[in-house]
């Protein structure tokens, strides 16, 4: 089974340890030598598994190979200090090639261990020194401008970065399988872990990403959206991180079998004929077989592979694939069935139906016929999302316009979420205005100060609701 432990903490800790040793002792010291050996071993391990090593400093966040590193109490001080070392030299990103040598690492770490020379741009000075020392297989660059700003902005951009990279991974993996390429599971593992970490840290921000319309191929976006929703629901249900990883992996690749179905069938507008439907209904069978063709499939979570096969069966087994013997649809499959239906309802993924508002999608799930979805999971999903889910654009009875940023934690007040005001009662945009709790009452009348009159389509007003959620 694939590990859900973060692969980047080791290299960052080793690099900071070597830098601290170089700041205290000469190169000949045994502590320095051991530190440099540890860095090379950690780097080689990542390079062997993943073919490359990149480190990004993005505001208060750090990424190793696109996976955000979580700073816990054990390593917070050292990794934060290393982040500041990189910042002092103007470094926002660092990349190492598989051919990077021990001499390259020694030169690079020695240079960043020294204080920058005053009077010249630190990054340019570091780049010049690397070139002077013949270091071409380790490169450095500036911070990404997209991560500058407030903590909320950084959080939103970190979520967007994770989302964008996950869409790319889904696309590359599925297109690679169609072309018969040997596809390794390691890159997918990183993408899923990144989604899990972002959902655990900023669930509302990640749920806001579901409204992004910046991508052309809705199939891959749908896969990432289902992964986000499934991980969020799994967290709400009390899953641990390992279980969330397995669930997220299953959700990201739940429709992998559709890559074997002709695009003309998948993208057909309107209803499918019998032969087309027969072909589409085989995608769970195709998906399970394709999971076995992934390089390293013996390490894939069994429950994840099973969920790819079962997610359209339905709890009463009236779905597909048809089963001969009675069985119980797996928990992961029941979760994915629900989250897939929700995302299909609010997005352009389905070619048979027009997208609806998030609150309408919730209503449809609540009113679905008995047996379509697991009743307990549906109730949990509605409680998690609220009647008006995160990123719903709403008109209040005060005339104000707002974006839902969080559900009400009280199950008895699901229709009264937290709303960020983005336009006043005169219709004037106010940017990211105050967040209002719709359970707030007027102390004199005991009436609610604000209530939702209706939801509305953000595209009608040219509003990107994801920009207002963080």
Image (cartoon, rainbow, N blue to C red):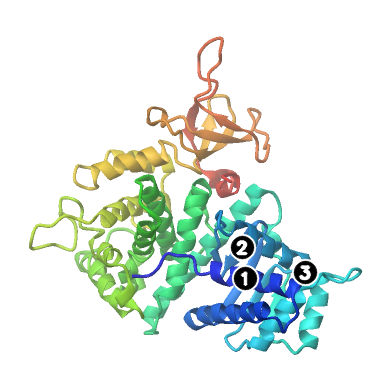
Other residues around mark 3 within 10 Å, as few (<14) / some (14–19) / many (≥20) = many
Other residues around mark 1 within 10 Å, as few (<14) / some (14–19) / many (≥20) = many
User: Alpha carbon of mark 2 to alpha carbon of mark 1: how far?
Assistant: 7 Å
State the residue in front, 421 or 262: 421
Q: Position of residue 9 (x, y in %)?
A: 55, 66
Other residues around mark 2 within 10 Å, as few (<14) / some (14–19) / many (≥20) = many
For label 3, the residue is: 89
Q: Position of residue 326 (x, y in %)?
A: 9, 57
User: Alpha carbon of mark 3 to alpha carbon of mark 2: how far?
Assistant: 16 Å
Above-or-below relation of 195 to 141: above
State the residue in front, 78 or 137: 78
Task: Point out the residue furthest to the front here.
Answer: 30
Q: Residue at x 53, y 18 (%)?
A: 441
State the residue in front, 62 or 283: 62
Mark identifier at residue 55: 1
Q: Are marks 2 and 1 in contact (CB under 8 Å)?
A: yes
Task: Look at the image and tell me whether residue 170 can be seen.
Answer: no
Above-or-below relation of 242 to 401: below
For label 2, the residue is: 62
Task: Look at the image and tell me whether residue 432 can be seen.
Answer: yes
Above-or-below relation of 443 to 365: above
Q: Is residue 99 left or right of residue 327?
A: right
Q: Residue at x 8, y 63 (%)?
A: 324
Callout 2 secondary element = strand
């Amino acid at each position: 089974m694939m590990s859900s432990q973060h692969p980047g903490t080791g290299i960052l800790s080793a690099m900071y340890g070597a830098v601290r040793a170089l700041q205290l002792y000469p190169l000949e010291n045994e502590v320095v030598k051991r530190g440099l050996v540890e860095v090379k071993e950690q780097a080689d391990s990542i390079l062997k598994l993943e073919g490359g090593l990149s480190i990004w400093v993005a505001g208060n966040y750090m990424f190793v190979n696109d996976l955000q590193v979580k700073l816990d109490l054990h390593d917070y001080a050292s990794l934060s200090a290393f982040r500041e070392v990189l910042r002092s030299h103007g470094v926002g990103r660092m990349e190492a090639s598989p051919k990077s040598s021990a001499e390259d690492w020694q030169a690079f770490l020695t240079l960043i261990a020294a204080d920058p020379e005053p009077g010249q741009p630190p990054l340019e000075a570091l780049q010049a020194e690397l070139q002077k020392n013949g270091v071409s297989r380790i490169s450095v660059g500036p911070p990404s401008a997209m991560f500058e700003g407030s903590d909320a902005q950084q959080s939103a951009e970190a979520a967007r970065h994770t989302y964008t990279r996950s869409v790319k991974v889904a696309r590359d993996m599925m297109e690679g399988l169609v072309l018969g390429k040997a596809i390794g599971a390691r890159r997918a593992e990183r993408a899923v872990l990144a989604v899990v970490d972002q959902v655990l840290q900023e669930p509302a921000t990640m749920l806001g990403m579901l409204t992004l319309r910046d991508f052309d191929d809705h199939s891959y976006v749908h896969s990432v959206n289902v992964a986000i929703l499934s991980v969020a629901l799994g967290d709400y249900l009390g899953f641990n991180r390992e279980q969330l990883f397995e669930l997220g992996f299953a959700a990201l690749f739940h429709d992998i079998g559709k890559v074997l179905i002709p695009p003309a069938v998948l993208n057909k507008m309107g209803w499918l004929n019998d032969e087309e439907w027969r072909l589409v209904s085989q995608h769970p069978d195709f998906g399970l077989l394709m999971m076995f063709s992934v390089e390293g499939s013996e390490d894939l979570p069994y429950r994840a592979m099973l969920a790819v096969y079962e997610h359209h069966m339905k709890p009463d087994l009236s779905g597909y694939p048809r089963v001969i013997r009675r069985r119980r649809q797996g928990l992961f499959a029941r979760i994915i069935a629900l989250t897939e239906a929700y995302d299909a309802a609010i997005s352009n993924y389905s070619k048979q139906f027009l997208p609806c508002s998030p609150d309408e999608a919730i209503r449809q799930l609540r009113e679905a016929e008995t047996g379509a979805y697991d009743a307990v999971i549906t109730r949990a999903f509605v409680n998690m999302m609220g009647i008006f889910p995160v990123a719903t654009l709403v008109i209040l009875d005060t005339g104000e316009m707002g974006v839902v940023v969080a559900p009400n934690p009280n199950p008895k007040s699901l229709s009264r979420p937290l709303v960020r005001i983005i336009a006043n009662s005169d219709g004037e945009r106010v940017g990211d205005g105050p967040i209002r709790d719709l359970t707030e009452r007027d102390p004199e009348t005991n009436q609610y100060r604000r209530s939702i009159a209706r939801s509305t389509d953000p595209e009608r007003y040219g509003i990107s609701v994801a920009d207002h959620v963080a």
